[in-house]
Image (cartoon, rainbow, N blue to C red):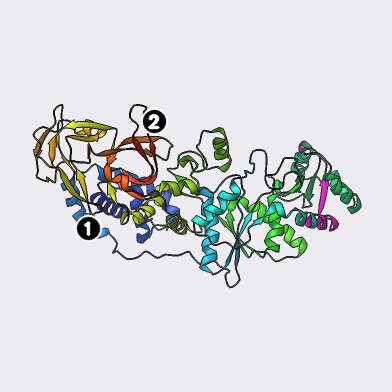
Amino acid sequence: MDKKPKSFTNEIYAYSLENSIAYGKAIPGSVLPKLFQHGLKKEQIKDIMLEVNKIVSEVNKISGPEKLKLFENYKKYLKDKKEQEKGLKDLQNHGKGMVFRLAPFPSGTLHIGNTKTYMLNALYAEKYGGKILLVIDDTIGSEEKQIIKEAYKMIPEAFKWLKVKFEKPIYYKSNRLKIYYKYAEELIEKEKAYVCGCNQEELRDNRVNMKECACRQFPVKIQRERWKLMFKSNPGQYTLRLKTNMQHPNPAFRDRVLCRISDRKHPRVGNKYKVWPMLEFSWAIDDHLLGVTHIIRGKELMIEGEMQKYIWDVFKWKYPELIYVGLVKLSGVEGKLSKSKAQHEVKSGEFTGWDDPRTWSVQSLKRRGILSESIREFVEEIGLNQNDINVPIDFLYSINRKKLDSKANRYFFVEDAVKISVKNSPKINLVNVKLHPEKDKLKKLKVGKNIFISLKDFNKFNGKEVRLMHLFNIKLGKETEFSSLENKPNIPKVHWVSDDNVKVKIRMPNGLYVSGFAENHVRNLKKGEIIQFERFGFCRYDSSHLSANIKHKEKEYEFWFAHD
């Protein structure tokens, strides 16, 4: 009889309540990682997230006092505060002298999706004291997936920021064309490759019907001549093909292309070459010549791996260890993670650049305030999954939040500010507030004639008593009045700024801006500093400039939103 899967309902309630009491509201991305301590498996994430989202939503609707009472019943399900087991699982075949390679195609910079597989190679190399080679996979590419010049700079920058210590020099496949030609000629001599002049329709029919191409029958001498002819011919006229078994059960493996003709200009070598290897052919040669011992790659590349093995067998070369991982789909990421798509949107001007938050590039995550060590831990937590899994982006945010929470100073920010004058308010000129709840350092907030709160809070609490955090209580309305100095636990708390404020705009992950006012201490921030705007989220200070308002030329401070 199948064992019934363990229920995590009590644990989800316990951590949701704990999270909500500590931070004002629970966040699914903060609850999920805690469940791994209770036996949650990575393959269960997709199913369990439905329950996590449902319970978190329920908990966030419960009032403060009721929440505390309920927590007393559930806190027994919390795990002791012990470090969860860290580290990647051991590879089956490991030892001294391991060599891993990172081989990105330079059609753009790294994004959060493909970074996962590259980082697994890097993390395992670090685990076993192996070498990491950076091989820029810049064969010519297709019309749809073209190389861009700036990627040659952005890719190494991204790896360096991720603290990946790759060997020098960087290898460029566009420097190695003559090496590929040498081995292509050897395959022809061994009668394992032939030059094909058939059109696409003929090739498709031959594959389906398991029929050998007529070009395949020419002797080696004629194949050599046709190979030389490729260097003088037009795109599509000829291809170099690998001789495989035309009875192979997978039609895609029957006589795969090794080299093709392209007359497009290459960003590094111009029009010096017109015969270009396919990626899997160049991999087969380079993985052997560069001494690569282990390759971690997506399982969508299994057919390419079989082609490599076929070529290694022809040359009687030892196989590197090929390790395939499942697809990781990131939920909560708006838009498609694609370098080709991002390239189009950057070129068209729809995106402001490769660090536009909508690209989800490593550069954009850095600019938002996601730490490199958070990305490394995120990849390590996912690990070598063989199955396709769905991981919420909140999982990355929860890791980053934990690292920032004890560091990032707190500041007040009011979105879509509404000005209120408080009748009969006590004369308070300054309020001392802690910069961080766990630090002793204080900041002084000036209290002027006017108070600004968010339009959202004004509409939500209109006619009700609220507490201006660290100040006093007021009753909101058409005429807002002071009500009390007492810090009542049961009334809503509202953040605010006074007359001494600065204009702020915050760029969100969807590319849009949120505008408002922040407290004046924002003026003292250093560029790149990551802070928390209370009850709004963690943000990274990006720049300051004069606002576009012609009448009032005031300084405007721009932040990028990391997460709440």
Q: Nearer the viewer, mark 2 or mark 1?
A: 2
Horizontal side, residue 240 vs residue 372: left or right: right
Determine whether the residue tagged by mark 1 lies in a helix, strand or loop. Answer: loop
Q: Is 203 in front, or is 121?
A: 121
Three-letter amino acid code at the position of disc 1: Asp
Q: Which residues are magenta?
A: 183-200
Dot 2, crowdedness within 10 Å: few (<14), some or many (≥20)?
Answer: few
Q: Residue 135 placed where, x, y %? A: 63, 56
Three-letter amino acid code at the position of disc 2: Ala
The span from disc 2 to disc 1 (Cα, nearest Å) is: 38 Å
- Residue 327: within the magenta? no
Corner quadrant of residue 451: top left
Q: Residue 434 placed where, x, y %? A: 22, 52
Q: Is 400 in front, or is 166?
A: 166
Horizontal side, residue 337 vs residue 40: left or right: right
**Disc 2 designates what residue?**
548
**Disc 1 designates what residue?**
440
Corner quadrant of residue 209: top right
Horizontal side, residue 72 vs residue 557: left or right: left
- Residue 193: within the magenta? yes
Check if mark 2's residue and mark 1's residue have beta carbons within 8 Å. Answer: no
User: Is residue 368 something that shows in the picture?
Assistant: yes
User: Is residue 326 something that shows in the picture?
Assistant: no
